[in-house]
Amino acid sequence: MNILHLSWMLGRPAKSRLAPQVLTASAYAMVSAILLIVLGGAYSFTSFESAAQGMYLPLAAFAVVLLVVPLLVLGSAAARLSARSNDRALSSLRLLGATGAQIGLVAVLQAAGTALAGALAGIVLYLLAAPLASLIPFQGAPIGSAIYLPLWVLAIAVVAVVLLSAGSAAAGLRKLVITPLAVATRSTVPTPSWLRAVITLAGILVLYMVFSNMGQFVQSIAAIIAVVVGGFGFGLLVMNLVGPYLVAKVGKAKLRKARTPQELLAARMILESPAESWRQVSGVAMASFVAVVGGSGAALMELTGSELDQGTWLEHVPADVTTGVLVTLAISFICVAASAAISQSASTLDRAELYRGLNRLGMPYETMNAARTKSIMIPALAASIGFAIASTVLVLPLAGAAILLKPLTVITVIVSVLLGLLLVRGAILVADPRKLLATRE
Amino acid sequence: MLENSLGQPPVLAAHGLYRSFGSTTALNGVDLQISLGQSLAIMGPSGSGKSTLLHALAGIELPDAGSIMLNIPGRAPVDIQGLKDKARTRLRRESFGFVFQSGLLIPELTAEENVAMALMINGVPRNAAISSAGAALAELGLAGMEQRRIGQLSGGQQQRVAIARAQVTGAMMVFADEPTGALDSTTGFEVLEILLQCTVGAGKSLVMVTHDPNVAARCDRVVQLQDGQLISDSLHPSATVDGGAQK
């Protein structure tokens, strides 16, 4: 029996693992559909005059790159979920003499298979959503039929999603130990160093100074784009550097103050792996960051539009930047929700035996669910507020207090943060231990 | 209801328990009474219904038919069969203690917090719960290990933490499913001694599923199950009537 056949036998749709399979495939479908819509939008920009293309295409490429990170996180979580939903079968194969590499290949193929199913469903979703997306206006007119990508682009996008998921699945499996007796999560408790905070603060300070001395270039559209894109890239880097440290600090503070079983358990769950906790909520921080940078960028664009631009392609830039920011935020939120749902489901399945056992001992599922929810929402709240403040500091020399206090900026930030938190809260409902484990009884 | 020589009814009385899974009958008309302060070993081959009986007695799973009455002195009798899921969960955490083969300790918590969690779920404030947990661990020879995480403890130490958790709430009944099954014989013997000391030694009842005749021999009473039926019920020669079988 070859590996492909084995992967199909173990990974084909089955009632016992329907919930994780549907969840994973749906997440891939959503991300693929979003990727295709963004690509469609970018593709439509190629019909603009060449000067406009010079500005719009880099921004579109930036939005596409933005999708790669959540896609990788999603792939990694999906592989773990896939291995978890098949834990008994994979352990049995090890017992029968299959090597770790063979089992790894089976799990990666299963993840890739789920991603393929999801990506194909994503094409259907894309085609269903395209008429709506084609109404989004750029350069003063709806995108229209330009949103529809050529077939070869669809094929490349599907292959890219499958390859990305397979690659991140292989990476995600390094966190699991598949032995002949069980599938277990490697237990490492890394403590993020305070050096991360120092490096981050130093980075913010350097960038603040650089930005403060670039005030004279702020009138130039190209400089604004360079600064916004550069600041955004740097912000993402800073976020991932300082995020786990911030989560660990918040977890420790919550541990000290914990009074109820769920508070104690949640704080310990956060501290178990601050890096993992961070990964689960990093999308919220990203959305928060996009909201501040994008919100102030949009407000800035409104101010910089001059009468000289009337009648040229530049006339539409401020409105298009606002549209771009809103689209990017929507994308961020959908990725955040999908990642949170997937990684929380994997986490619940990771702890299935413990959850069932604790319920036998008399711990209500509600307590476990409350602890699990808190262990996500506490870092999510800290991430969104913390990074809204950090990115405000970062953007301050660029935009100035007047811009940051403009109603458009403030409203964008507040609505984005609230919406992001609500989405995460809603998405993790699918990983309620009582409901999710009931499907595997 | 049968009574012991002091006129007390059994602390747990099961009558006519029947449970099936598909075409397999796990329990087939089991009657069993357990006295306060008694240790009872449930033995039998694999698939004979041992764990199903333990789960039914502890209110973890309801039998398809039969009745189970809990009669802890000083409290109103409880018909476990008549309780809804939430009420049974509450009963388990308030009135029973459990020690399973795998320990079922929460890996993220320290030894002390694992024990304290049993009290906190029952509404005891954290500081008081931690204090009681520390004392319970010290009694079981784990002083100085309170802050260790579960992964940093040996199998025997983990089972001691589980025993501390089972008895810290003052539960009068402790259920154990192969509590020494994953331990070597020396450690297993030590853990068994501690378990007996913390339960029957303190006037509580212990119901234990085991495959090991040496473990069963340390109990006051041994019942044998086969194909879901009770085929023997014997008192240990040294068991007293008050703490022994009431058949």
Image (cartoon, coloured by chain):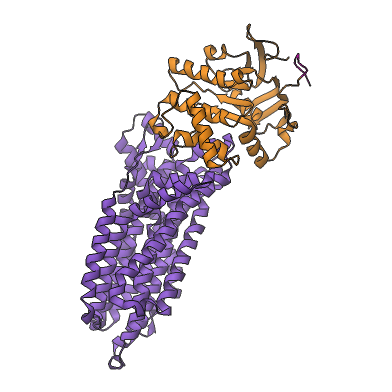
Q: Which chain is orange?
A: B
Q: Give whichever of A299, B148 is nearer the camera.
A: B148
**Residue at screen point 29% across, 86% down:** A314
In this view, the residue farthest toward the top is B237
Position of A374 compared to B226: left or right?
Answer: left
Q: Which of the image's four quarters has the N terminus of chain A?
A: top left
- Based on the picture, tell me whether residue A303 belongs to the magenta stretch: no
Q: Give whichever of A285, A203 is nearer the camera.
A: A203
Which segment did they paint magenta? B1-7
- Secondary structure that dominates the magenta span: loop
Q: Looking at the image, can residue A18 be seen?
A: no
Q: Which of the image's four quarters has the C terminus of chain A?
A: top right
- Name the quadrant containing residue A313: bottom left
Residue A115 horizontal/vertical position (percent): 38, 54
Q: Which chain is purple?
A: A
**Residue at screen point 65% across, 42% down:** B86
**Residue at screen point 60% across, 42% down:** B123
Task: Please tell me whether residue A377 is drawn above or below residue B67 in the rendered image.
Answer: below
Residue A329 horizontal/vertical position (percent): 40, 69
